[in-house]
Image: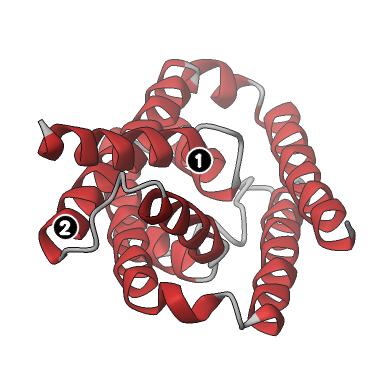
Amino acid sequence: MEIIKIVCAGLLISLSGSLPLGNLNVTAMYIAAREDMRSAIQFAIGVCIIELAYLCGTFYFVDKLASYASLLFVFRIISIILPVLLAGGCILSLKNKEEKNIVLDTRLNRFWLGAGLSAINPLQVPFWAGWILYLLVQSILPARLMAYSLFAVGAGIGTFTALLLFILAGKKLSAFMQRNRYMVNIITAFVFLGIAALQAVKLFH
């Protein structure tokens, strides 16, 4: 019973953190709509592997992270810059006759693109640190290697499930998005800019 509780805790926390619009899930939906399921799944796997690496690192350093306020500030700055760059790629693609996004339409394998974007999106560290500390204090998550491993499995499943939902949505809307690329690029750019603005508000408050 404890095993199920730990796995479900990781799954539900990861799912709730991944479902709101963000750089990674919007990008996964964008790839699914413009390319194919295989590319989008590769992207999602890359994202999940890096998130699990961050999570494992957070387990190890969780008792020290609270003292690194300056590091958290750097994470916040990165979380503002990244969506602005993605939005810029969408806007610049409007001027390209082939309608290519200079950020997303690279020759880089989608697995490595997902891993790369996830790696430079390190706000997941304070996110997981907060939750891990809470779960440890509430005795929901025992301070044992096996418990940490089970929690990480649940977290990986939760993140992949959330990305898969966005991928399926993107695939279902692919025909519409192909017919209305100009409008979709503008909307996507505004979504990324909205994410950046939200992170900026969080930073200054």
Tell me residue 196's x, y (percent): 77, 53
Mark 1 surroundings: few (<14), some (14-19) or many (≥20) residues within 10 A: some
Kindly identify the residue that appears in the image at 34 percent across and 74 percent down: 57
Tell me residue 107's x, y (percent): 40, 65
- Residue 196 visible? The answer is yes
Q: CA distance from mark 2 to mark 1?
A: 19 Å
Q: Which residue is mark 2?
A: 149
Q: Secondary structure at mark 2?
A: helix
Q: Which residue is mark 1?
A: 17
11 or 101, which lies in front?
A: 11
Quarter-wise, where is residue 166 in the image? top left
Tell me residue 74's x, y (percent): 69, 78
Tell me residue 125's x, y (percent): 49, 65
Is 166 left, or right, of 101 in this rendering?
A: left
- Residue 160 visible? The answer is no
Q: Please determine whether, in this image, residue 99 is positioned above or below residue 21.
A: below
Kindly identify the residue that appears in the image at 64 percent across and 45 percent down: 99
104 or 29, which lies in front?
A: 29
Kindly identify the residue that appears in the image at 75 percent across and 62 percent down: 80
Q: Amino acid at mark 1?
A: Gly
Kindly identify the residue that appears in the image at 45 percent across and 59 percent down: 133
* N-terminal label among 2 and 1: 1
Quarter-wise, where is residue 28 in the image? top left
Q: Please determine whether, in this image, residue 178 is positioned above or below residue 116.
A: above
Q: Secondary structure at mark 1?
A: helix
Q: Please determine whether, in this image, residue 88 is positioned above or below residue 69.
A: above
Q: Amino acid at mark 2?
A: Ser
Mark 2 surroundings: few (<14), some (14-19) or many (≥20) residues within 10 A: some
Which circle, 2 or 1, is nearer the viewer? 2
Is 190 left, or right, of 76 in this rendering?
A: right
